[in-house]
Amino acid sequence: MIYMRTFSLISFVVIAFGFSHYPNAVKLEYVFKVGDEYVMSQSTKQVLKQTIMGTEQKGENEYTGDMMMKVQEVTTDGAKLEMQFIKLKSKSVTVLGEVLMNSEGDAEQVQNKMLKAMMNKPFTVTANRSGQIVNVEGADNLWSDLSSMNLDDNAAATAKQTLQQFMDDSSLKSNIEQAMVRYSDAKVKEGDKWNSMTQLPMDFPIKVDNSWSLVSVSGGTANVNADGIFTTTDKEKTIDLPNGIKAKVDLSGAQQLKSTVNVKTGWATDLMIHSELKGKMILLAGGMLPENMDVPMEIVTDTSYKITKK
């Protein structure tokens, strides 16, 4: 009977520890190994509302895409990753109509050709173990095949300008960093909080200050969430819009991020972001505008990422 009780006690302890919830602090960070490959799948839906001369206009953007990531080199505090787009699809609906672009769509469509020319063009991303993107190099390789599209000079120049605006080193850095969970430099336990700051992946001068928290750790999985505050960093910065229009922005808002991460690798298997921005855009006088025009606007965005190890 004593042996049975002893065995039962040992079994209980083993089971209890087998399903432990990491009561002690853990070190969460990205673990890079040369040759490791991941596929990052992104899906974004965005609704933009703006009021021009008393009339509300609504625009919708949808984006889906897959990106391949391969660890090329492990550095002192992180790694260099070779990244490349393997498929992209976008849909934009405005008062002017609908624009569809698909790297796997009809190759006779100019906009599809432009996306297709960007596929499988590698560029280099340097990241540290905390999840910060240090820099991006080689984005100009994305439009290296535009000459194969047989566009006239004006169309080629416009296509290159569009790609440079949305896919330059800085834009890619902000966009990729959005999919990275930012970890504390110290060990953390459930309930602990830490902070980070990133730039928004858009042409507007907006930053997001995130307050991160470790919600739970169980087995090989952790739930890490963040609440973010958007702030316009330079309300006097002039940005270029289509048709030669120049503007300034004054926007603020908040975002909520939820992620499920692999404790052993640091990579998020699932990450979801909901954000809301409100404020105004100021269209600057010039051309057809005799004076500055305030345009109230609101941007609501939902983005999800899935990162899968190959």
Image: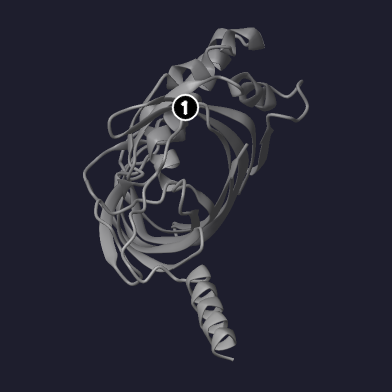
The reply, left or right, for residue 28 in relation to residue 148 is: left
Amino acid on which the number 1 mark rests in the picture: Val
Count of numbered circles on the image = 1
Residue at position x 21%, y 44% from top?
236
In the rendered image, which quarter contains the N terminus? bottom right
Comparing 85 with 150, the one in front is 85
Q: Where is residue 163? Give x, y as percent.
A: 49, 25
Q: Answer with the quarter of the image where residue 145 lies.
A: top right
Label 1 residue SS: loop
Q: Mark 1 points at which residue?
A: 34
Q: Answer with the quarter of the image where residue 176 lies.
A: top left
The reply, left or right, for residue 133 in relation to residue 151 is: left
In the rendered image, which quarter contains the C terminus? top right
- Residue 256 visible? The answer is no
Q: Where is residue 205? Give x, y as percent.
A: 29, 44
Question: Hey, which residue is sitting farthest bottom in the picture?
Answer: 1
Mark 1 crowdedness (10 Å alpha carbons): few <14, some 14-19, many ≥20: few
Q: Answer with the quarter of the image where residue 2 lies.
A: bottom right
Q: Where is residue 191? Give x, y as percent.
A: 33, 72
Comparing 92 with 25, the one in front is 25
Comparing 238 with 16, the one in front is 16
Residue at position x 51%, y 63% from top?
219
Comparing 289 with 151, the one in front is 151
Judging from the image, the colouring scheme is one colour
Residue at position x 62%, y 11% from top?
151
The reply, left or right, for residue 64 in relation to residue 107 is: left
Q: Where is residue 54? Give x, y as percent.
A: 46, 62
- Residue 165 visible? The answer is yes
